[in-house]
């Protein structure tokens, strides 16, 4: 199984393509299984996609959306991925979708990991997982150098708590195993810097230095990289 890479001249061209593809994928899942399950990621890159997808005519009550990872902050915090999803995706037509939060009332994610793992384990195979990639080679909240990296790559649990060494906030992240329980994985990337990181990640397989390689080099789930040059 090889990684398919689609390159676009602009972010808008990428969003046009990705919106059409995701809409079809969600429609197909609903028609075949009665419900669609979509995993999304935070950050600024997916906002135009979220805004476009939110306007689509879909059977949104039959769609469940969940985040790949989350900073352990109140959902009202400006840095919260949940806030980002609620403000940009769970709007318009998509306001009727179901959302599964990675947050609990626990003081830290380590206290909440078992509860969140059970919550995620109750969900069936995802139809699509959309991941990003940091310039350090992290994806979801699986960071190089973190004490929890090996756990994230090997655990049977669906989620784990992570404290990055060089990024703010403790996190809750889906594990590699839970993310790979999907019919399709996408990487949504933009810019020359991310293109260079992608090339480096594809050239070697050491997951300790670049955890994103655990997804780019696996043979279980099809991976499509969507990369906009600007």
Image (spheres, grey):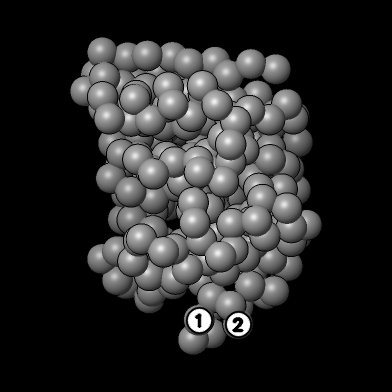
What quarter of the picture does the N terminus occupy?
Answer: top right
Dot 2: element: helix
Which residue is more in the foreground, 46 or 156?
156
Q: Quadrant of residue 135?
A: top left
Determine which of the numbered discs, if any, sits on residue 30 in the image: none
Dot 1: element: loop
Which residue is more in the foreground, 187 or 86?
187
**Residue shown at 49%/56% (left/top)?**
145
Residue 152: % across, % down: 64, 56
| Relative to 55, 201 lies left or right | right
**Residue shown at 58%/19% (left/top)?**
3
Residue 43: % across, % down: 33, 48
**Residue shown at 59%/50% (left/top)?**
64
**Residue shown at 75%/36% (left/top)?**
33
Residue 146: % across, % down: 51, 61
Which residue is more in the foreground, 98 or 181?
181
Q: Which residue in the protein does label 1 denote?
A: 108
What quarter of the picture does the C terminus occupy?
Answer: top left
Mark 2, other Cα within 10 Å: few <14 / some 14–19 / many ≥20 = few
Q: Give the vertical position of 199 relative to 38 (above or below).
A: above
Residue 102 visible in the picture:
no
Q: Are marks 1 and 2 in contact (CB under 8 Å)?
A: yes
Residue 122 visible in the picture:
yes
Mark 1, other Cα within 10 Å: few <14 / some 14–19 / many ≥20 = some
Q: Which residue in the protein does label 2 denote?
A: 111
- State the separation of the CA atoms marked 1 and 2: 6 Å
Q: Give the vertical position of 100 relative to 110 (above or below).
A: above
Q: How many dots with numbers?
A: 2
Residue 213: % across, % down: 56, 35
């Amino acid at each position: 199984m090889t990684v398919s890479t689609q390159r676009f001249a602009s972010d808008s061209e990428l969003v046009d393509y990705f919106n059409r593809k995701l809409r079809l994928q969600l429609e197909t899942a609903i028609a075949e299984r009665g419900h669609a399950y979509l995993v999304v990621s935070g950050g600024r890159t997916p906002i135009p996609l979220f805004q476009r997808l939110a306007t689509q005519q879909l059977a949104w009550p039959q769609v469940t959306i969940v985040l790949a990872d989350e900073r352990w902050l109140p959902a009202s915090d400006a840095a919260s991925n949940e806030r980002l999803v609620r403000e940009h995706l769970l709007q318009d037509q998509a306001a009727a979708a179901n959302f599964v939060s990675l947050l609990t009332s626990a003081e830290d994610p380590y206290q909440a990991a078992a509860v969140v793992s059970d919550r995620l384990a109750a969900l069936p195979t995802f139809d699509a997982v959309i991941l990003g990639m940091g310039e350090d080679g992290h994806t979801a909240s699986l960071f190089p150098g973190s004490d929890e990296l090996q756990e994230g790559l090997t655990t049977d649990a669906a989620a784990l708590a992570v404290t990055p060494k060089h990024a703010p906030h403790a996190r809750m992240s889906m594990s590699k195993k839970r993310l790979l329980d999907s019919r399709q994985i996408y990487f949504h990337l933009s810019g020359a810097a991310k293109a260079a990181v992608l090339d480096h990640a594809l050239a070697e397989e050491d997951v300790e230095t670049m955890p994103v390689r655990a997804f780019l080099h696996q043979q279980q789930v099809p991976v499509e990289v969507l990369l906009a040059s600007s």
